[in-house]
């Protein structure tokens, strides 16, 4: 693996390959360790995809607030926009990205904090 300072090209392909390997590994371990789907997850099924207008809002919010350069204020603004969007796969991933970025106040690799 190539580290945290790569943004595109091989890293994108690597993410697909490694992501698939991780998913396969996790799927193979779930039954062995007694993990079950939490009741909250069963109750709260999400849309598979956002409607185009909501996807556009999400993309604009993430580009402006959680792009290559970020601040606590920009992450908060993006989070507020996402809070108004329906639950879907895309919003779940975007919310996880914002939470992770907010938890890391220092610049590291391609995560650049301006504050």
Image: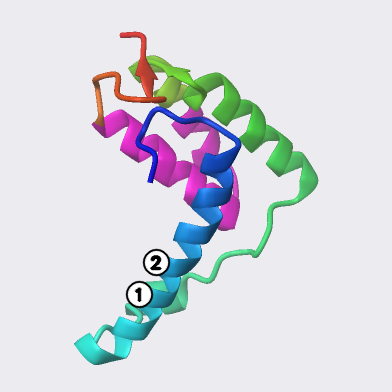
Image coordinates for residue 79, horizontal then vertical, percent:
45, 33
Q: Is residue 48 left or right of residue 16?
A: right
The circle drawn on residue 26 is 1
* Overall secondary structure of the magenta section: helix
Residue furthest out toward the left = 33
> Which residue is tagged 2?
22
SS state under label 1 = helix
Q: Nearer the viewer, residue 111 or 39?
A: 111
Q: Is residue 53 left or right of residue 71?
A: right
Image coordinates for residue 84, horizontal then vertical, percent:
55, 40
46 to 74, vertically: above or below? below
Residue at the image point whose x is 56% and y is 41% from the top = 10
The circle drawn on residue 44 is none
Image coordinates for residue 81, horizontal then vertical, percent:
54, 32
Count the marks: 2
Identify the image quadrant of residue 4: top left
Q: Nearer the viewer, residue 16 or 2?
A: 2
Image coordinates for residue 96, horizontal then vertical, percent:
40, 46
Q: Check if mark 1's residue and mark 2's residue have beta carbons within 8 Å.
A: yes
Residue 83 magenta-drawn? yes
Q: Nearer the viewer, residue 100 or 45?
A: 100
Residue furthest out toward the right = 52
Q: Is residue 109 left or right of residue 6?
A: left
Residue at the image point whose x is 51% and y is 50% from the top = 14
Q: Distance of mark 1 from mark 2, alpha carbons?
A: 6 Å
> Which span of residues is magenta-colored?
78-103
């Amino acid at each position: 693996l190539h580290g945290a300072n790569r943004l595109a090209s091989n890293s994108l392909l690597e993410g697909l390959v490694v992501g698939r390997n991780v998913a396969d590994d996790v799927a193979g371990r779930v039954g062995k360790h007694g993990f079950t789907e939490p009741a909250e997850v069963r109750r709260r099924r999400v849309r598979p995809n956002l409607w185009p207008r909501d996807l556009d809002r999400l993309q604009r919010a993430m580009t402006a607030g959680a792009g290559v350069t970020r601040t606590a204020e920009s992450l908060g603004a993006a989070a507020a926009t996402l809070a108004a969007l329906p639950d879907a796969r895309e919003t779940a991933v975007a919310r996880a990205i914002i939470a992770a970025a907010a938890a890391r106040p220092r610049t590291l690799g391609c995560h650049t904090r301006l504050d």
